[in-house]
Amino acid sequence: MNFRAEPPYRHGQPARTAVLLVALGTPDAPTAPALRRYLAEFLSDPRVVEIPRLLWWPILHGIILNTRPARSAAKYASIWTPEGSPLAVWTARQAQALGERLAAAGHRVLVRHAMRYGNPSMPAVLDALRAEGVTRVLVLPMYPQYAAATTASVADRLLQWATGARRMPEWRFVGEHHDDPGYIGALAGRLKAHWREHGRGERLILSFHGVPERSLTLGDPYHCQCHKTARLLAERLGLAPDEVTVTFQSRFGKAKWLEPYTEPTLQALAAQGVKRVDVMCPGFVADCLETLEEIAQEARDAFLEAGGETFHYVPCLNDEPAWIAALAALAERHLQGWPTREAEDTVELQRQRELALAMGAKD
């Protein structure tokens, strides 16, 4: 096996710890060439498209990558900001805010972010962390609800990178946090703040990203975790079951996905006489194409055209202080036992120095 170049090992060098936030990904620019590169990587992941390669490859390379990039680029252009992709901007801010919060609590850790698809890539960020002397990494996928197509794919990429490492860091991996009290509290706080400013709608729609229905029968807990998040959020807000509707968006292909679908549900509510709705996407912790374009634009238009009168999209958690506090608490729970405070670093360094001296004496 050809191993990647590693930083030279030095006896007595203190171990460093990092927290790595991993988001789904985004193209580098709202252009067809950039979307073609991004979609090629994303849709080539067997976790994302569970179709035999022999059948899927001609469809992907013969049809999708020749037709979809231009359409997707136009959608990205409608939500692109002067700073770049909203997902990239918010994820970077979350990492910075988390680092500041952990530092204020006395932790000496590096906090970085990466994208599962696109840039900054997971391998590039992990290489950079190793160059900085990091030997322990807490990987925190930014998916509250576990799905094989998202969370497990991050683990796959992590292991792929590790196969070429001479010295693998210690790993800890946060698989899910769909029922984390801090996360639920941050969602509730976001909704309360929105209602104080805009008033409440007749119905709260909680729209989660969809996955193929067969994933449920194959053992994926995603569907149940989405509903648990919704139930806990409704309880925190004191809402009755008939005041909240769970839906699923972003269907791709012709297979049956988790139902009910978001846009048809909104159209049906409008047809039933519901005039105002509030829509939130709890499964997305940072605003992105699926929230800003698919929900705040396309779903809004569908509801209004079907007879609805007022549509309010409630933004994602983004860098909301309550969410950063919840992230910090989540990270701290998973960092327990690793020396992340200055006093702990001193003890660890002394231990390594004593070991180095003992080895020197033995030689």
Image (cartoon, rainbow, N blue to C red):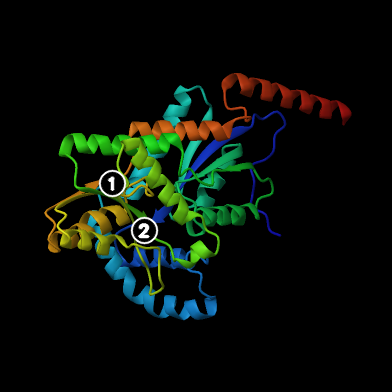
Q: Residues within 10 Å of mark 1 (few under 14, many from 20)?
A: few
Q: Which amino acid, mark 2?
A: Pro
Asked if residue 116 shows in the view, the reply is no
Asked if residue 192 shows in the view, the reply is yes
From the viewer's perspective, tell me whether residue 124 is left or right of residue 162.
Answer: left
Q: Could you give the CA–CA distance between mark 1 and mark 2, rounded to whole angstroms?
A: 13 Å
Q: Name the element at disc 2.
A: loop
**Quadrant of residue 183 in the image?**
top left
Q: Residues within 10 Å of mark 2 (few under 14, many from 20)?
A: many
Residue 252 position, x and y percent, is: 37, 68
Residue 65 position, x and y percent, is: 38, 73
Closer to the camera in the image, 103 or 82: 103
Closer to the camera in the image, 161 or 314: 314
From the viewer's perspective, tell me whether residue 208 is left or right of residue 297.
Answer: right
Residue sitting at x 52%, y 64%: 217
Residue 239 position, x and y percent, is: 30, 41
Q: Which amino acid, mark 1?
A: Glu
Q: Name the element at disc 1.
A: loop
Residue sitting at x 49%, y 51%: 146
Question: Looking at the image, which residue sits at the far top?
Answer: 343
Residue 129 position, x and y percent, is: 55, 41
- The residue pinned by badge 2 equals 27
Q: Quadrant of the C terminus?
A: top right
Q: Quadrant of the N terminus?
A: bottom right
- The residue pinned by badge 1 equals 83
Residue sitting at x 54%, y 37%: 18
